[in-house]
Image (cartoon, rainbow, N blue to C red):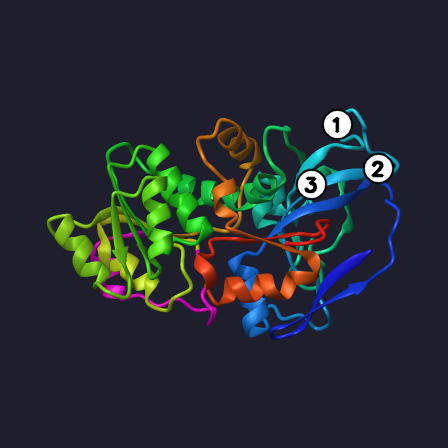
Amino acid sequence: MRSAFLYGVRDIRVETIPDVDPGPGSVLLEVTAVGICGSDLHTYLFGSVGGIAPEQPLTLGHEAAGVVLAVGPGVDERQLRVGQRVAIDPAIACGVCERCQAGDPHLCERLMFMGLYPYHGALRQRMLYPAQTCVPVPDTISDVSAAMLEPLGVALHAIRLAQIQVGEDVAVVGCGAIGLLLVRLARLAGARRIFAADRYAWRLALAADYGADVALKADEVDLVQEVMRLTNRRGVDVAIEAAWADATANQCVEMARHGGRVVIVGIPVEDFITFRASAARRKELAILSSRRMKHTYPAAIALAQDRRVDLDVLASHTFSLEQTRDAFETAANYSDEVIRAVVLPNTPTG
């Protein structure tokens, strides 16, 4: 089979590797779709993400879907059968550490994460994976949407942390795929006004389709001044940071109202965030960091199945596995009005 490996910064090579049969508790999957996430781009462009750098060639990709080709010993075929379409949860929790026992597997102290060194990801034609982390999806959800359930789950977890109340004002700074999903979920949660900020006009146009009331072009206006003007100097109840930029965390702090909430979703390039301490203290802001997702797949599947969230529209560009480097370059350079670049590993052409 063929697999894409990252050898170094902007150096992706597609190579042939052996197939392996599934062992106890695992399944062999044919990978159908893999989204290129911002965290993948961090490793591709800068050689690391969150302080973790690959020490040998690594297969990236954690937003993924597949079809079960074979099941290993001990897998209950009544729950996961050959031919079953699945979304692939990229995180494998240990199940026994303090956080797992407390019901927070996303905070597992021994978490193994697909596509984060040393664990290979889904940018390959076939892969072995634990059956317990494969989530069956209905046939009404496309392969691409099944892969996009992972970013939807990430956005769902962040929205739950934000605790948006009906009638509250919300700002989302950064309208990539997850930012756009945050906009849509904020609308479904009952936000009164949603302010969406981004540098790119096509992203803001989709943010409006997803429910944003006000589109703010980040390179043309002072985001804080504009939000404060539009809210009569009050600020927003919830400000959600979903971008890479150095200034965005502080912008969220500055535009939040007194007693408001700030949720940090984006991963900064330098692995540090900076904001004005006096503003955060005087407003007594609740500042929360959001990590991945927590028990969100059932809700994500329901939202996609009911068409309350359109996931297919996010996959603006598709590529074959042999075109994986092109997919990363398109996403990294914001080319051709890209929203999400998606690799279809078993499709001959993109």
Q: Under tag 1, what secondary structure?
A: loop
- Please indicate whether residue 254 sits to the left or right of residue 102 in the image: left
Q: CA distance from mark 1 to mark 3?
A: 12 Å
Instruction: Identify the residue shown where x is 40% and y is 55%.
Output: 242
**Which kind of residue does numbered mark 1 sit on?**
Gln
Q: Residue furthest top?
A: 78
**Which kind of residue does numbered mark 2 sit on?**
Val
Q: Under tag 2, what secondary structure?
A: strand
Nearer-the-camera pick, 10 or 90? 10
Q: Does the magenta portion include 192? A: no
Image location of residue 39, percent across then percent down = 54, 60
Nearer-the-camera pick, 194 or 248? 194
**Which kind of residue does numbered mark 3 sit on?**
Thr
Image location of residue 33, percent across then percent down = 65, 47
Highlighted range, magenta: 266-286
Badge 3: residue crowd in 10 Å (few <14, some 14–19, many ≥20): some
Image location of residue 348, percent across then percent down = 72, 52
Q: Which residue is mark 1?
A: 79
Nearer-the-camera pick, 32 or 269? 32
- Please indicate whether residue 61 sits to the left or right of residue 173 in the image: right
Instruction: Identify the residue shown where x is 20% and y is 58%.
Output: 282
Q: Tags 2 and 1 in contact by the CB under 8 Å rule? A: no
118 to 317, vertically: above or below: below
Q: CA distance from mark 2 to mark 1?
A: 11 Å
Q: Which residue is mark 3?
A: 133
Q: Disc 2 or 1, which lies upstream in sequence?
A: 2
Instruction: Identify the residue shown where x is 52% and y is 41%.
Output: 312
- Please indicate whether residue 135 sits to the left or right of residue 184 in the image: right
Q: Which residue is mark 2?
A: 71
Quarter holding the C terminus is: bottom right
